[in-house]
């Protein structure tokens, strides 16, 4: 279906185009330290699954918000040159790049999740000369189970909003009234996506800030990424606001995220100073250790003896603030006192 010629008569906005063409490679550059940090460290410990859930769904909603609002521009690509089409839809590539790179953090988080923290382990102590025997169970730890659920929610959310956006845009012809460029259902859907994205972004960093505060460690978080992205988020919000068809629902998410990320950055810098004072690295290991993974061994707690055997359940991450004189990232040990009630009590801790 051909569109009216005047509908596709766009003027070049060199300021918006300049910002966009700087921000797209800038996004890749800013996310690179975080992605490489997880890969090189061989662990994703320190991330909050809730942070990854909120960030992935928020960025996906922001991407489809702009796709929806700029769909009349996208339709014009059949009648304008490739260069003009790319120029006018560069904002979509920009938010799409941001969504893809953040989603890659979730992918690496799942791939590099510490294996010994995925399942509960039993440490059997026979109270003789033999060392504690570790038996791995098939029971998933609570955080690994949450991480798997988060991954499925992110996938389903993406599938649902993709299908809904596609159906609405394909079934809605362009409005013949130039003062009403979007049918009501398109406007409502775009507003829903934009407001949802902004609300998710507003609380996105709260779980990560809380987790980092309790760990009192930087963990796998990348400070260079946050240094680049905190001011970059404001610039990106301005860039999106300058795109044709975009409104406040399109840029709000990026402005809110930039402010929250700056708060997380300040906290991580404070923990960096604290870590140096305590002589530990970002994962709670004494400085100078060559191990590539954070400290994962469990420390046994006093237990009751039953027939000369004590069973210690291992494999949970302790999110409580640890003492300053001990490593801060360790597996939590829970004593299993025997019997069905003791087993249930142990799982609930």
Image (cartoon, rainbow, N blue to C red):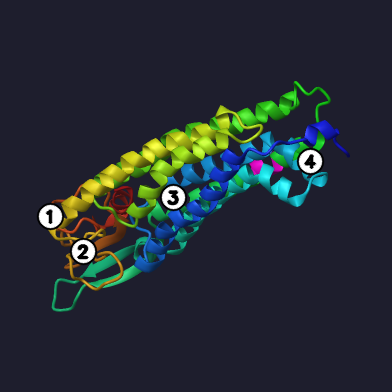
Q: Which percent across, then down, holds residue 316? A: 31, 56
Q: How far apart, in angstroms, are the residues tagged by discs 4 and 3?
A: 43 Å
Tell me, yes or no, if residue 148 can be seen here.
Answer: no
**Mark 1 surroundings: few (<14), some (14-19) or many (≥20) residues within 10 A:** few
Who is closer to the viewer here, 298 or 277?
A: 277
Q: Residue at x 72, y 27 (%)?
A: 185
Q: Is residue 278 left or right of residue 82?
A: left
Q: Residue at x 46, y 60 (%)?
A: 108
Tell which tag, 4 or 3, sits nearer the viewer. Answer: 4
Q: Which mark is residue 235?
A: none
**Residue that badge 2 annotates:** 285
For label 4, the SS is helix
Q: Is residue 279 left or right of residue 99?
A: left
**Residue that badge 3 annotates:** 146
For label 1, the SS is helix
Tell me, yes or no, if residue 146 can be seen here.
Answer: yes
Q: Which percent across, then down, holds residue 37? A: 37, 62
Who is closer to the viewer here, 22 or 245?
A: 22
Q: Residue at x 74, y 42 (%)?
A: 74
Q: Residue at x 88, y 38 (%)?
A: 2
Q: How far apart, in angstroms, are the residues tagged by discs 1 and 3?
A: 34 Å
Q: Which residues are magenta?
A: 160-164
Figure quadrant of residue 129: bottom left
Tell which tag, 2 or 4, sits nearer the viewer. Answer: 4
Tell which tag, 1 or 4, sits nearer the viewer. Answer: 4
Tell which tag, 1 or 3, sits nearer the viewer. Answer: 1
Label 1 close to label 4 by CB (< 8 Å) = no
């Amino acid at each position: 279906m051909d569109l009216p010629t005047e509908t596709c008569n766009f003027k070049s906005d060199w300021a918006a185009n300049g910002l966009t063409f700087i921000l797209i490679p800038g996004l890749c550059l800013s996310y690179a330290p975080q992605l490489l940090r997880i890969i090189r460290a061989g662990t994703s410990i320190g991330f909050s699954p809730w942070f990854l859930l909120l960030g992935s769904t928020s960025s996906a909603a922001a991407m489809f918000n702009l796709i929806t609002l700029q769909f009349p521009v996208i339709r014009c690509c059949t009648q304008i040159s490739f260069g003009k089409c790319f120029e006018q839809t560069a904002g979509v590539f920009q938010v799409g790049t941001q969504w893809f790179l953040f989603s890659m953090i979730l992918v690496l988080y799942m791939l590099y999740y510490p294996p010994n923290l995925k399942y509960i382990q039993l440490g059997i102590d026979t109270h003789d000369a033999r060392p504690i025997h570790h038996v791995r169970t098939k029971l998933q730890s609570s955080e690994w189970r949450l991480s798997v659920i988060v991954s499925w929610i992110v996938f389903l959310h993406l599938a649902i909003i993709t299908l809904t956006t596609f159906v609405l845009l394909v079934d809605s012809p362009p409005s013949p009234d130039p003062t009403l460029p979007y049918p009501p259902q398109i406007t409502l859907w775009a507003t829903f996506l934009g407001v949802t994205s902004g609300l998710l972004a507003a609380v996105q960093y709260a779980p990560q800030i809380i987790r980092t505060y309790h760990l009192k460690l930087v963990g796998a978080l990348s400070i260079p990424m946050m240094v680049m992205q905190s001011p970059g988020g404001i610039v990106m919000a301005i860039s999106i606001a300058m795109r044709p068809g975009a409104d406040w629902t399109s840029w709000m998410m990026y402005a809110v995220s930039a402010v929250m990320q700056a708060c997380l950055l300040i906290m991580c810098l404070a923990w960096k100073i604290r870590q140096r004072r305590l002589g530990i690295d970002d994962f709670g290991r004494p400085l100078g250790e060559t191990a590539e993974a954070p400290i994962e061994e469990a420390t046994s707690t006093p237990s009751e003896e039953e027939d000369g055997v004590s069973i210690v359940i291992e494999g949970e991450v302790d999110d409580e603030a640890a003492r300053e004189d001990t490593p801060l990232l360790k597996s939590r040990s829970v004593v299993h006192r025997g019997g069905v009630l003791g087993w249930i009590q142990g799982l609930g801790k």
